[in-house]
Amino acid sequence: MVGEIGPGVLVLLGVAPTDGPTDVEHVSRKIAELRILPGERSVSEVPEAGVLVVSQFTLYGDTRKGRRPSWNGAAPGPVAEPLVDAVVASLRARGITVATGVFGAHMAVESVNDGPVTVIVESPGS
């Protein structure tokens, strides 16, 4: 077990090659402030809520051609990893409990989707 939270939000975080510090702050703020928890509260408002951040380059998989996805829309590891770390640091700076996966590792991720509520958060440059 690498990262675990109780109630809260699972963030599958994809990074594009053009993402930067402005995108980190926008996405971090949205994750912290979206009113998607019970009672229309945000992670920032629920002390026992946590965030599990898992880097997920496959969100940029392009399946429009052929039978194999293209991952060209995802940032390479040396670009993506510092930005994932920056999102985690930004959430922690807001006082939120954050757990993480291991960047670039094959992981088994379990989630209980209570709701279900699944949203896409994109930065303005996306």
Image (tube, rainbow, N blue to C red):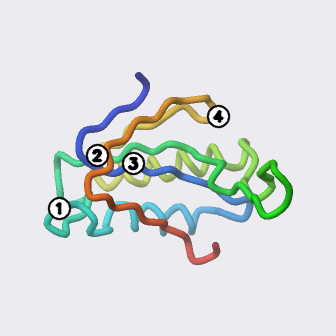
Is disc 2 surrounded by few (<14), some (14 to 19) or many (20+) residues within 10 Å? many
Q: Quadrant of residue 60?
A: bottom right
Q: CA distance from mark 2 to mark 1?
A: 14 Å
Q: Nearer the viewer, mark 3 or mark 2?
A: 3
Q: Which residue is mark 3?
A: 10
Q: Amino acid at mark 2?
A: Gly
Q: Is residue 12 left or right of residue 118?
A: right
Label 4–label 1 contact, CB within 8 A: no
Residue at screen point 19% across, 65% down:
41
CA gap, disc 2 and disc 4: 22 Å
Instruction: Classify residue 70 as left or right of residue 27.
Output: right
Towards the viewer: 9 or 21? 9
Residue under the image location 81 percent in, 55 percent down: 72
| Closer to us: 119 or 32 | 119
Marks 3/2 in contact by CB < 8 Å: the verdict is: no
For the residues labelled 4 and 1, the Cα–Cα distance comes to 32 Å
Q: Residues within 10 Å of mark 3 (few under 14, many from 20)?
A: many
Residue at x 62% of width, y 54% of height = 59
As drawn, the residue found furthest toward the top would be 1
**Mark carried by residue 50:** 2
What label sits on residue 38 in the rendered view? 1
**What SS does tag 3 mark?**
strand
Mark 1: which amino acid?
A: Pro
User: In the structure shown, which secondary structural element does the residue marked by tag 2 occupy?
Assistant: strand
Of callouts 3 and 2, the N-terminal one? 3
User: Which residue corresponds to mark 4?
Assistant: 104
Which x, y percent locates residue 89? 44, 48
